[in-house]
Image (tube, helix red, strand yellow):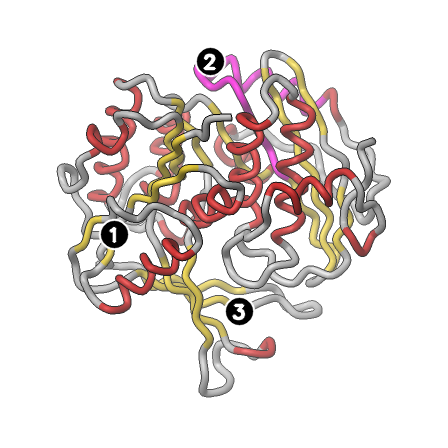
Amino acid sequence: MKRQRIVTFGELLLRFSKPDHLRLTQGDMFTSKYGGSEANVAVSLAAQNEDVTYITRLPDTPVGHAGAQCLAQLGVDISRVVYGGQRIGTYYFEPAAGMRAAKVVYDRAHSAYYDLASGMIPWRDILKDADIFQVSGITAAISQQAADATFEALDIAEELGITISFDINYRKNLWRYGADARQTLRRMLARCDMMFGDAIEFEWISEHPQPPFTATDSNFQMQIPEYSAWFDELHAAYPRCRHWLMGMRNIVSSNHHTLTALLWTEGTLLQAPVVDIPDVVDPVGVGDAFMGGFLHAIHAFPGDRQRQLDYSLAAAALKNTIPGDFNLSTEDEILDVMHHRYTASTLYKSFE
């Protein structure tokens, strides 16, 4: 089967954390990893043997080049990365522990991506033979210039007839340059063919209260009629979007999460099983792993929507076991979890 060509666009970040669950105010040593939503999706797709190109702007410094090389080593095409600016964006991550919630501190102002402007990226050339363009709300949240570049890319992708995939990725703390976040993301949503978000983001963008997801184990029963009506309303408001994917997570404790997901497509709502994950290693990038899984699954399992959804959730579940932002799971590993591993320690119920 011919591989898809997928283009993702966003800011590559350098993530800093203290070792051994120390708080950011403790100790004298940081560990670092590269990440960022759209880069996470790109790495996930490359691990599943897709042809994926990542577009960003990085400083022409050893730190910027090291970030690009990190992605290249994982199979991502970085040949169209644009270089310029003074610094790479960073974030500081303090993981949850016991009753202590996780904490994220961003340092992205005037990064190379922050100062990106329309016309810097040759979108028409990059997108001319792409099958899918993947973008998220974060791309428009950093600065007005980055938002303008995002809509420039969306305009060209739409003109070329490319499938547009959109992750809401609403991050309240990033919207500091004066734009109306909900209005901007709704403009992006109106242009997309498939959309992903968690239940909280769906509630925020639609201003529609969500049925609660309070699963503490895999026996939780979803309120499917209520969700179905909600998705019908969303599709009526944004008729271009054909596939609506909602991920749900309940944090039972810092290292015990439950996950499930819904897929609305062509008037039908599908549900994945509830996954009980008792030993979470790193929850960062779980939604990106889901999106990477789905973009692969729609090509690998054409026409089988339930299989596509189940595969995507298995990919997201596996990401919880991998340190760092990236999901490094292959298709075989995801299928193995999806079909054969069905105890709590191996995450997933059998679908056979």
Report crowding for label 1: few under 14, some 14 to 19, many 20 or more residues within 10 A (C-alpha): many
Which of 202 and 60 lies nearest the eye of the viewer? 60
**Span of residues in magenta:** 226-247
Q: Quadrant of residue 289?
A: top right
Report crowding for label 2: few under 14, some 14 to 19, many 20 or more residues within 10 A (C-alpha): some
Q: Which residue is mark 2?
A: 239
Q: Is residue 269 left or right of residue 91?
A: right
Mark 2, secondary structure of its residue: loop
Q: Residue at x 65, y 40 (%)?
A: 248
Residue 38 lies, with reference to residue 192, above or below; the image says below
Q: Quadrant of residue 159?
A: top left
Choose the circle earlier in sequence order: 1 or 3: 3
Mark 1, secondary structure of its residue: loop
Residue type beneath disc 1: Tyr
Residue 176 screen position, x and y as percent? 31, 51
Task: Tell me the number on the disc at residue 113.
Answer: 1
Q: Which residue is mark 3?
A: 94
Q: CA distance from mark 1 to mark 2?
A: 32 Å
